Amino acid sequence: MTLYYEGSDGSRIDLMGNAIFAQDPENLTKNKWEYSTISGVNGLGRVKRFYKDTQDATLTLGIMADSKEEFNDIMYNLHRTFDRDIRRMRPGKLWWNDWCREVFAVETSQDDFEELFESVDKEVTFVSVYPYWVKRITYQYTNAANASGGLDYGHNYPFDYGLEEVVEVVKNDCIDAANFELKFYGPAENPSVTIGDHVYAVLDSLDAGEYITVNSLTKKIYKYDSYGNTENVFHLRDRDSYIFEKIPEGITTIARSKDHMLDITIFDERGEPEWI
């Protein structure tokens, strides 16, 4: 398995490498649902709702360096990376294979320091405000306005079509309806897509090299130009249809203008990652 910490600046610390080794990674898989109850008839209660609250997990990192200089560099890098994310109020990410969870390293302590062997056990407590492990699955839909011939789906769907009658789909294998990110590419006028019977649209113009992202998890809509500039275009969403409606479970047909290119990224959110 791979296990590493990605700082908010994109830096990466391998937690299963030669000098740093996570001794108890299973601690990170703790999964807990909170719940609230209400009283019922004759004193019998019932569950009103289940929800996720902030969760923490402690990981023990065995650190063993080949020299004093390497040991000091490792310890400083861990401290600097964790504290920088805290001070900037920007979470880092714990990556478990293809799954990630946003976290802050809120507490560290050391035990069993051996100066002669340049080694120590470092305990790190991570707090997650949104305690889900997330894997991103992206489906790309390219410009098919001038295409001809047939289409053979690569996802084991029980149908093939000629392009003149093509039916495009998105597949959600998650436990339930899923959060997502839409990415509309230019050139396009009022880019939109219909997933099932629900319309997702932004009332704006996109030139070649520009794109718009719609993120249902963060509830944000941004436009990016070819120079790297970013613009908040939340106010340009189509107000006749809720643009952050989750994508239903299963295989769902989509409809779009065939000359509008877009990506649909499904966020597979789980209480614990896939182990292997």
Image: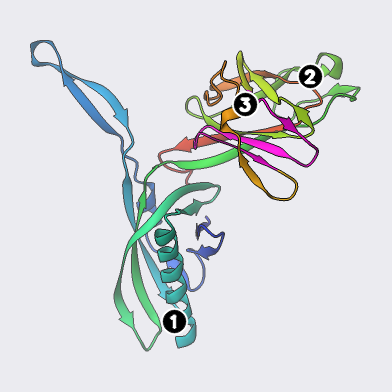
The residue tagged 3 is: 171
The residue mark sitting in front, 2 or 3, is 3
Q: Does the magenta stretch include residue 154?
A: no
> Residue 167: x percent and y percent?
75, 17
The span shown in magenta is: 201-224
Residue found at x 48% / y 74%: 19
The residue tagged 2 is: 160
- The residue type indicated by label 1 comes to Asn
The one nearer the camera, 131 or 119, is 131
**Marks 2/3: CA distance?**
16 Å
Which of the 4 image quadrants contains residue 213?
top right
- The residue type indicated by label 2 comes to Asp
- Crowding near the residue tagged with mark 1, few <14, some 14–19, many ≥20 C-alpha atoms within 10 Å: few
Among the two numbered marks 2 and 3 on one chain, the one whose residue lies closer to the N terminus: 2
> Residue 238: x percent and y percent?
60, 21
Q: Is mark 2 on a helix, strand or loop?
A: loop
Residue found at x 39% / y 70%: 62
Marks 1 & 2, CB-CB < 8 Å contact: no
The residue tagged 1 is: 72
Q: Is mark 3 on a helix, strand or loop?
A: strand
In the picture, measured across the screen, residue 208 lies left or right of residue 238, that is right
